[in-house]
Amino acid sequence: MSGSLAKMMRSDAGKGLTLVSPTLIYALLLLAAPLASIVLLSFWTQLATVAGQAQFDRTLQLSNYREALTDPLYRALMLRSLRISGMVMLVTVVLAFPVAYFISFHVRPDRKSLWLFLITIPFWTSYLIRVFLWRVILAYDGPVNSGLLALGVIDEPLGWILYNANSVVITLAHAYAPFAILPIFVALEKIDRSLLEAARDLGESKAMTFLRVTLPLAMPGVLAAVLIVFIPTIGDYVTPQLVGGSGGTMIANNIHAQIFALNDRPMGATLAVLAMLIVAMVLLWGIARARFWLWLMDRAGGGFAGIGLALAVAVAEITVIRVAFSQGPALIGAGASVIALLLVATALSAFILWRLPKGRWGI
Amino acid sequence: MSQKTPIVTLTGVQKYYGDYHALRGITAEIGQGEFFSLLGPSGCGKTTLLRSIAGFEDLSEGQLLLDGRDMEGVPPNKRPTNMVFQSYAIFPHMNVAENVGFGLRRSSMSTEEKRRAVGEALEMVGLGKFGARAAHALSGGQRQRVALARALIMKPKVLLLDEPLSALDKKMREVMQVELIRLQREVGITFILVTHDQEEALVMSDRIAVMFEGEIAQLADPETLYRRPNSRRVAEFIGMMNFLPATVLPTGPGGGRVALEVAGLGRAELETAQCPGGAAIGEAEIGLRPESLTVLYEGQSAEGGREAEGTVREVVYYGDMTYYDILIDGAPSPVRVSMRNMPGRRVLDFGARARLAWDPRAMVLFC
Amino acid sequence: MRLNLLAIFAAVYLLVLYAPIVLLPLFAFNDGTVIAFPLRGFTTQWFAALLDTPALHQATFNSLVIAVSTAIFATILGLFAARAATRYGFPAKAGIIGFIMLPLVLPEVIVAISLLIVLMQLGLNSGTWSIIAGHTLICTPFAIAILQGSFANMDRSLEEAAVDLGETAWSTFRLITLPLVSPGIIASLLICFTISLDEFIIAFFLSGNEPTLPVYLWGQLRFPARLPVVMALGTILVILSVLLLVVAETFRRRGLKRAGLKDTGGFL
């Protein structure tokens, strides 16, 4: 027994586990245990605060979740967070792709690391101050407005660029730029250049080579960029607080308010858990649908017919979801409609991921 | 090639990686001062065997004796072996002399003695003036020499070389082959070389173990391996060989000889030594090296009338040699014949008829 | 033509990326209390004001203590995990490493709130040590990413060669492994230090009455009169971060050179 244990410890597996254990134990204690405890806390309810000590009803119940899913305020908050994160992700990735492409394909090899370095530098400077400076830039009398006024593009300062969701999107898109560029750049760098030459040699135009070879091969990088931008932005606190105004608050601001201002820790925990669940479910939905739409496109023989079909199916499903979300509460109640929606959408995602093989975009 | 006192004894060595059976019962003895090669395709277990001798892999079963001592549980740093790694593993943060003297750190020599030892080792590999050179400023051949000096300075009982020449270009490889033979003769240490290059093994080794799928298929000196491979697989791996279907006849001539009917060539009689895999009456194959077939020109005739006729199907001109693929009348597939090009000797054209001389003494029988 | 358009786009992109940082020194040296254009004139009074703000000095000190401790702890934990990940195969390896790397993609607010709630439930007071713990958690993945690169770049047979030449496992680590990954270790220390110094959310949730520099800054942003001083402080911070980064990058490249490899990109 002790002999076999000693042999196990000498094996690669034993040495590896021993070596990784300090870090693993640290992560278990400071990440897994706290995460588990906020999940637990989210099922408790706040009773009252007596002399600064919070009192909890420790029976496990779903009342926080019921409140979060039915109260229009929370619903609006979560939808807005999702919408802002989605916009940030879209803007960041769409703007980052050409830059990553430029660095990978048009910058001399010995200059590439300099470009990457230049792009990462702003990311390492104080986040707080960067966000605050966007407030200055976008302000009523800031450089954007005064510049546009001086150029005669506008007659009066733009009011819609500060203290709302737009300014949050602009600021976050700026903050997460390097996170989008780097993974796309890495994916583009991995593309064997002779593949592109082969495509040209086989008669494809430059544009079609890009669409048929470069873009599909860069897709894993784009996907990584999507994940790495979407997930953290949904929990951002500083940007909505500084430039968001009342119309641009996001879930993290509310979590903070629940804990520090309202002293309702279980509700704060519930919102945090919901934020994680929403992110997970939306990503699952996005990956499953991307795979499904690609599959549809291929089934329809590609080309415009395929793109059309996939687009039609996508628009149809999104419309159904929107209608269900807005009309559901009136028909079967707010909580029930959200749960039904989540169950159906997630079940569909799981079904797609289970039945359809991994597509050519690596998702 | 007399068998010397064994320095390495392998008995029933087995190695498993999970379900993968990497070494399947290796038994061999390697003699004192021998240049021994482990030859085989990639994945045959030759490197695993070498690393097991060095102590980097534990044996799953079986026994390994080094100089008569059981190596079970002895770590690499306590074994009387040293290794030249495939990548050479030159420490990049040390200069040449520091690399070569690395293993002396724990020895009881004085600083002066160590310096002298390093100098001698460098001299031996022809790098006398390179001691202060930075590791990254070395060429491939020089790195190889540093790795050799670094291992030899330890005066190991066995020097292990893991594909030491595979990273070098063709010219450098030939230079280093000769260099290694010279070094081995000079220091008299047992060398065990792992290689997938049959030519390299034939050139350098006293004995070669050909390995396939974790087993030794044949262990012999280079000449035996080349002339009398014991299986078609070994024959195919070492050099080029032609195979022709043959029938072992029941009515042998006696005296330990075997009578055959070879497709396209006719009747032949072989010594038992030419049947290293044994001979059984019925269908079989014979193997013939390209150089043991000769194209006959006008006026030439074969000894004993052992001639065959055929059509040239392919001509490959190499400068000093020409290779012909000739389909012998009555044979199912062409045989390759190599002919030295000489002044006045005409290179045959594609499609020409050709006469061939063959010699039964060059044949090997595979059943 | 296409190349030109792309190049122009990339240049504009870079310009916008730097826009906020370029504004910073403008306002830091601007002789006016309002952070708006037009600029008034040159002054260094805001930098002078930094010197006589004791609360700022205390916050800076707290931040430095946290950042240095975080850098050390995260790099040590990173060394263990990176070594295990590059050198050994073990059961559930992808799951274990993935879990350790999780803070990289988890919204920071989740980490912050879960740590805060645990502390509150345990009745412990949050403070400098809890921020160090939180920062170590989020910095370890960065340390692992950097160190994994260093370990992976190192030819495994170098260590085997040292053992083969008579060294023990420990002396091999000291003589061969450590010197070869030391550029990675230094880069990891610097990066973790920078991340910790700049981290706001976790510090904000856990700081209690010991604010870090970003938390102090956050408090100052509410007072318009203090903004020019904040700009001055921001300028100094930006310059320091850039300096640290250049040093870290230099070490990373030196490490690559030492390992005899070609440069293939940045930290991430």
Image (tube, rainbow, N blue to C red):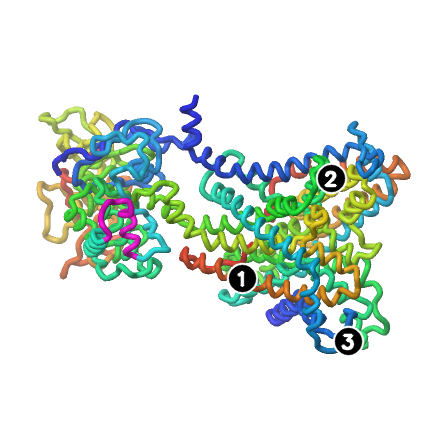
Task: Say which label, 1 or 2, has the lower sequence index.
Answer: 1
Label drawn at residue A273:
2
Q: Position of residue C145 (x, y in %)?
A: 54, 49
Residue B105 image label: none
Protein chain holding label 2: A
Which span of residues is magenta-colored?
Answer: B96-111
The dominant secondary structure in magenta is: helix
In-image side of B264 versus A36 (left or right): left
User: Which amino acid type is shown beneath numbered disc 3?
Assistant: Pro
Image quadrant in which the N terminus of chain C is located: bottom right
Q: Nearer the viewer, mark 3 or mark 2?
A: 3
Relative to A139, is C159 above or below?
above
Q: Quadrant of residue A209?
A: bottom right
Instruction: Evaluate whether residue B212 shows in this view.
Output: no
**For residue C38, which numbered disc appears in the image?**
3
Along the viewing direction, whichever of B33 and B131 lies nearer the viewer? B131
